[in-house]
Every structure is written in C-alpha cells, then in structure tokens.
C-alpha cells in the first residue's frame, strides 16, 4: 500500500512528483510501508494495534498527532521491532529506495542508528551490511524501470547512550561502502552534542562529514554545540535558529530583521537547514511561532537567504512524502516552480558527495525543472 503522496499536486502545470528531488533528512525506521510492517510482524509473532494496513497507517498518524512524545515514540518501538534481522533491514531499505524513486527523488541520504538493531543477534557491521544490500537492491530495481537513484547511509549514534565513538568508527569503516556521513539522533534536550566530543573529534580527524540533529527539541545552545563540538556541515532541522532573529519592523512586504551572531554565521556560511515542515509541526519544534504551517519560520528563513532544504523526517509517522511537503509549502507560501527548484539546489549543494557528483545533481535538477 502506498503512503498518501499528494501525488497529483501540480505547480505551474507541472507535476511536483515528477520533478527531480533530493532527500537529506529521512529516517529508515520512520519510512516503513504499513503492509511491510504487518508481514514482518507476522514472521516474528509481534502483536500490532491492528492487522489492517490502512488502519495501521491511521494509527501512526494519530499517535504522531497526539501531541504526546510518549505516544509518538511508541511508533518507533514498533518499526524498530520488525527491523532486528538482516532480512527485515534489507527489505525495509530496498522499499525505502523504491518509494523515494516513486516520489521523484534522484538522490537520498537515509539515516538510522545501527545500535538499535542488535536485539536479534546482529553485529553493528552485519546491520550496516544488510541495509547496504537493501539499498543496492532498491537502486537496481529502480534502474530496471529506466530511472536512476542513489542513496547513501548516514550512520547515527543515539545521543542518550555512550556508544558514539564506536559508531563514529563504524561509519568511517564503511566509507566507500555505503556510509556518507554521521549524525546523532534521539532526545536532543539534555543531551547536547558536546557529550559526544570524542566521537566528533575522531570524525574531524578523519575528514568524515557530519550532520547533527539540533534546533528541534532544544534551542540555540544546541545549535551552537552542533557547530562547535560537532563541526556539523548541516543542521538536522535547525529550525530554532529563527530564535536568533528579531523581526524589528514589518511594513507590508518589507521585513526588517536583526541577526544574532549564530544566525548570521549559519546564513552566511550557507549551512543547510534540514527543515521538515510536517514533522516540525507535530514535534512542537515550531510551537513558539504558532500551530499552522503558515506560522512555520520556513519562509522567513528562505527569504532571508538561509540554505533551506525540504525534508520528510519520518514518512510513515507524518504520512507524508517529499512531494506532499513541497505541495503544502507551495500552497501555504505561494511558491513558484523556481522556489521549489531553489530548495532542491540547496539540498544538492549540501549533499555528502564529491563536488563532481554534486554538480551532476545540480545539472539534473536544472534539466528537470526546465532550466
Ligand atoms: Zn530526524
């Protein structure tokens, strides 16, 4: 069963789904097909809230919309439970790629935390290899349909555990064999990047790319630590960087804004913000600006010249796709084709790829948007 895609949304007569897209912030354990969960759960005799795929899709949405973090996190208990075997990981990774391609994505980065997939007896290495096999199977299946997609792994450490150095070493060991970057995930508030300084020092010594979840459940101090302790090249969401902006005057279309040093740095160094509109609404990351997408500081950040990118975060929990996120933004902020193209170009420029590969993506995006 396909997740609702907003599949027929058009902008200036062009199908948004058909446009070439880049997905940078997309969790493996947040992107399972409900039908796959049912089948994998059956194999391991796991109890589910329902045995109907459509009802399960509804359940994910309800839990995620509940406003309760506890209810929201239960959804990940369920998805990770069916991803404890090599077969389960491989299948989920293969479908992850196929679903991205069906959504028009030409390059993606999938983030996940291997340490959460060891309950069935896999080693960290086994788990990374299983995911890599699944990604490659997915890429092959897509190329069999005449399209092209590449997906790289972002190996994440959990920020509330103490395995980050080991996970950083794992990521570097898989450089050239699927791993393109490193992240820390899990509870942000109370678990700053500085807790993982040895891992980040090691990654820096190996010149290994890092993105850090920061500025989602915690504010400016977390973003500062991501940049200073983590040496993050991108910010996972980073949406609360807007707390370092002060709108001092608003006359019609004209907005006067003063920048704090941190916001100025993030904008002027073009550090990509992995914004995820639907998720940011559901997790309360943008609560201080309001409760509707119109209140999300996405457009303010874009208009001020930040390197904004559009992401799904967790497709199953938010019942979304990149096409849907772009459609919602276009509806809300009256964006045109050239705006959606700018978001994809920002994402391509921020991808953890060589400069030649990024230029290739930029060319493909230009062609696809009719430039
Ligand atoms: Zn995330």
Image (tube, rainbow, N blue to C red):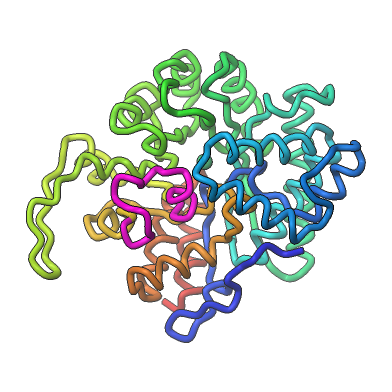
**Which quadrant would residue 321 be assigned to in this image?**
bottom right
Q: Which secondary structure is most common in the magenta stretch?
A: helix
Is residue 334 placed above or below 79 in the rendered structure?
Answer: below
Residue drawn at (40%, 60%) of the image: 343
Q: Residue at x 77, y 63 (%)?
A: 1
Residue at horizontal 79%, vertical 48%? 37
Is residue 71 found inside the magenta-colored segment of the image? no
Q: Residue furthest bottom?
A: 13
| Highlighted range, magenta | 276-295
Give residue 273's position: percent from left, percent from top. Answer: 38, 46
**Quadrant of the image for the C terminus?**
bottom left
Count of marks placed on residues: 0
Residue 280 included in the magenta stretch of the image = yes
Q: Is residue 195 visible?
A: yes
Q: Position of residue 215 (x, y in %)?
A: 36, 37
Q: Residue 125 sits in which quadrant?
A: top right
Give whichever of 359, 245 is nearer the camera: 245
Q: Is residue 348 visible?
A: no
Q: Position of residue 318 (x, y in %)?
A: 57, 53
**Where is residue 149 shown, x and y percent of the image?**
65, 59
Query: Nearest the camera: 74 or 135?
Result: 74
- The quarter holding residue 5 reads bottom right
Left or right placement of residue 241 versus residue 276 in this view: left
51, 172: nearer the viewer: 51
């Amino acid at each position: 069963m396909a997740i609702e895609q907003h599949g027929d949304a058009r902008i200036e007569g062009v199908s948004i789904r058909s446009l070439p897209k880049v997905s940078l912030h997309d969790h493996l354990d947040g992107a399972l097909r409900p039908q796959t969960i049912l089948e994998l759960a059956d194999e391991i005799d796991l109890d589910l809230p329902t045995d109907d795929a459509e009802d399960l899709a509804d359940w994910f949405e309800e839990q995620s919309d509940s406003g309760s973090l506890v209810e929201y996190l239960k959804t990940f208990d369920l998805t990770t439970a069916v991803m404890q075997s090599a077969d389960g990981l491989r299948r989920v990774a293969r479908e992850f790629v196929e679903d991205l391609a069906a959504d028009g994505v030409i390059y993606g980065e999938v983030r996940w935390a291997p340490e959460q997939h060891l309950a069935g007896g896999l080693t960290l290495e086994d788990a990374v290899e299983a995911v890599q096999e699944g990604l490659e199977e997915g890429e092959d299946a897509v190329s069999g349909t005449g399209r092209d997609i590449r997906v790289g792994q972002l190996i994440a450490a959990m920020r509330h555990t103490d395995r980050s150095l080991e996970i950083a070493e794992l990521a570097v060991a898989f450089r050239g064999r699927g791993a393109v970057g490193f992240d820390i995930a899990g509870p942000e508030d109370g678990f700053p990047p500085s807790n993982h300084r040895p891992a980040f020092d090691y990654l820096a010594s190996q010149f290994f790319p890092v993105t850090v979840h920061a500025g989602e459940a915690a504010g400016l101090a977390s973003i500062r630590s991501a940049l200073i302790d983590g040496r993050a090249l991108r910010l996972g969401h980073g949406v609360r960087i807007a707390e370092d902006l002060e709108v001092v005057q608003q006359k019609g279309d004209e907005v006067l804004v003063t920048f704090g040093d941190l916001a100025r740095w993030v904008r002027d160094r073009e550090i990509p913000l992995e914004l995820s509109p639907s998720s940011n609404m559901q997790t309360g990351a943008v609560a201080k600006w309001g409760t509707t997408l119109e209140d999300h500081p996405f457009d303010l950040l874009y208009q001020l010249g930040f390197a904004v990118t559009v992401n799904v975060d967790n497709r199953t929990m938010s019942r979304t796709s990149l096409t849907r996120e772009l459609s919602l933004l276009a509806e809300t902020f009256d964006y045109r084709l050239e705006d959606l193209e700018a978001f994809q170009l920002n994402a391509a420029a921020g991808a953890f790829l060589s400069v030649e590969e990024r230029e290739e993506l930029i060319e493909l995006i230009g062609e696809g948007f009719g430039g």
